[in-house]
Image (cartoon, grey):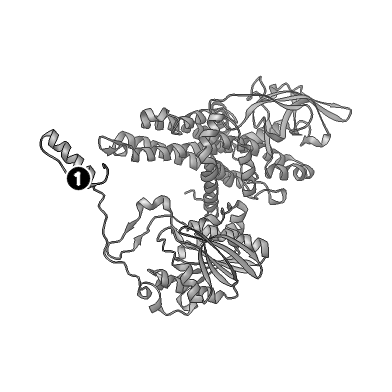
Amino acid sequence: MNIAVCVKPVPDPGHYNRININPETKLLDRKGIPVIINPVDKNAIEAALQLKEQCGGKVVLVSMAPPDTVETLKEALAMGVDEAYLLSDRAFAGSDTLATAKILAAGLKKIGQLDLILTGSESADSGTSHVPSQLGELLGLPHLNHITELSLELPVIKMKAKIENGYVEYEGRLPMVLGVAREINTPRYTTLMGVVMAQNKPITIWGLNDLGLDPAGTGLSGSPTQPGDLHFPRHGRKSEILKGEPEAIAGKIIAILRSAGVLA
Amino acid sequence: MLELSEQQELMRKVVRDFVEKEIAPIARQIDEEDTCPVELFQKMAPLGINGVFVPAKYGGAGLGFTEMVLVLEEIARHAAGLALGLVAHYMGVYAIMTWGSEEQKQKYLPRICSGGFSGLSITEPGGGSDFTGQKSTGQLVDGEWVLNGRKCFITNSHCMSVNVVTVRTGEDAKGRPQISAFIIEGDTPGHTPGRKEKKAGLRGSYTGEIILNNVRLSPDNLLGKPGDGAKISLGTLGEMGRTGTAAAALGILRGCLEESVKYAKERIIYGKPLSNLVNIQMIIAQNRTDYEAARLLTYNAAGLKDAGKPCAQEVSMAKFFATEASVKAAKRTMDLMGGYGVITDYPVSRFLRDAVATIPACGTSHIMQVIIAGAELRK
């Protein structure tokens, strides 16, 4: 069974206070911010590794990211993933979720022969949850998101997906695209031996031409979602200063409290 | 410039991830209850931590002493007591790995790399630095070694599954005590823990007595040759134990640095962060400099050890500097925090108690200075 896990390197949430938005490009300025694997993507890796332990086969990692994220991908390889594909090209910069999904789909098609594609349900930095569904549509595969339980009784795959007020149970047949939720498992700790082994696992880098993509369909130019104006929320509280005699002020306070529904 | 490789940096990241999830949340509890979290030790084993420098064929991670320092620094950043328990364990592991026969390595190393505790029992009530003054004995009776005596200040005393013990087995041709080393399995009849000490610092690792009461051992339990005890125990303490203790002090130093920066940024006084004050900046500068100096000394010593070069002087300098500097840094950080520094909701008072306790561990600062000066004067 061959499983691909799509992962996104994201800024370390421990350093969010250092992240700014460039007012001109409207993009996050991530310079100097450590990068980690999107936390819920580790749950997707864990799910893939468990399925591999059950059924055999191979787990590959696919990520669209700048070339300097190779070291971050090695952490995933150290968890037990067999090999990684980094989709990296200047033309990919500024991609929104749809352009990202197109690039990932091109990479997944090029890898070929995949039985299951897993992603995290959402990314820690943008949190749209778009990519799992977009990938499914682009690849022509059934897709589900927010999966909290997963079991394989070949050829049937059973899934439980959380919804707003509960959950839904599904049964399906592979291949599929699934976005997993944090509740699905606890990712294993990476071992020191795993780190050593990761150094010799292959990381293939594919650019725009390798994937046969049209530059107009990737990056900022290929992104239908464009940030609008930036507004910084005001955190000041609404206030009103009451003046007059104490009795009159007390009466006004009671009237305000009544109108706010605090007093009957 | 001393720089870790990308592989070592990734190792630091994965160890830190484990420490922040499993150890940091209970570090205060470990200190307050003064119990050794044995279950944590068993959780660390599959990650390769317990046998970090042991070859893979004996169940270790097949790495080196630089990685050992890295592991200990990360653990000691939050729980120095647990880190010292690991240092003591590493000493037993190192002694068997370095001086054990192939049979002994195959028999004991996989067990103690996979969750069993080890340790090194040298010190006796008469003194730790007076190595040849030890009174515990080993006598060959009917083809078996019979060990009797009492060891004290032994870290992991109450949880060891494999203990490396030194005893007096006779005298050499010049009438000097002959000290030999033995491997004793924890449940061997007559080998029992005695009193458990109540320590001011480095709580969370058991330190106490080991009682040897007619412990009968096969000749196969002798580590090295008769009379190798000094070489084994001083070699273990001198290079591995002290490097490990320096690494633990390094972790405390980093804790002091990070806590001082965090507090100085968050504490608002007269409407401004404490970090705006120059005297506070001086404390942070001193903490940073002490951490950096200790880091360079300790990783350099470990790097020399990994390269197979003589390093006794460098290890002693690292241990001397890092332990003493950690005490000063903890005191400075408490000064920075004012009244909050002595409240146990913050870890800094624990850092001070732990830092003080690293000084006698594996040889006092006085002994370190004797070694450093001796090496210098012999040049």
Left or right of A31 in this view: A101: right
Does residue A221 lie above or below B357 as drawn?
Answer: below
Left or right of B286 in this view: B41: right
Label 1 residue SS: loop
Q: Residue furthest front?
A: A264
Quadrant of the drawing holding the C terminus of chain B = top right
Residue B282 or A175: which is nearer the viewer? A175
**Which quadrant of the structure image shows residue A101?**
bottom left
Q: Position of residue B364 (x, y in %)?
A: 56, 27
Q: Is residue B373 visible?
A: no
Left or right of A4 in this view: B111: right
Q: Position of residue B149 (x, y in %)?
A: 74, 22
Residue at the image position 76 percent from the left and 21 percent from the top? B175
Does residue B117 lie above or below A173 as drawn?
Answer: above
Question: Badge 1 local density, few (<14 within 10 Å), some, or many (20+)?
Answer: few
Residue at the image position 36 percent from the left and 32 percent from the top? B336
Q: Residue furthest top?
A: B126
Q: Position of residue B138 (x, y in %)?
A: 79, 26
Q: Position of residue B321 (x, y in %)?
A: 49, 34
Tag count = 1
Q: Residue furthest right?
A: B142
Q: Is residue A26 visible?
A: yes
Say which amino acid is labelled 1. Answer: Ser
Q: Chain of mark 1?
A: A
Residue B203 or B39: which is nearer the viewer? B39
Residue at the image position 51 percent from the left and 44 percent from the top? B20
User: What residue did someone put label 1 on?
Assistant: A239
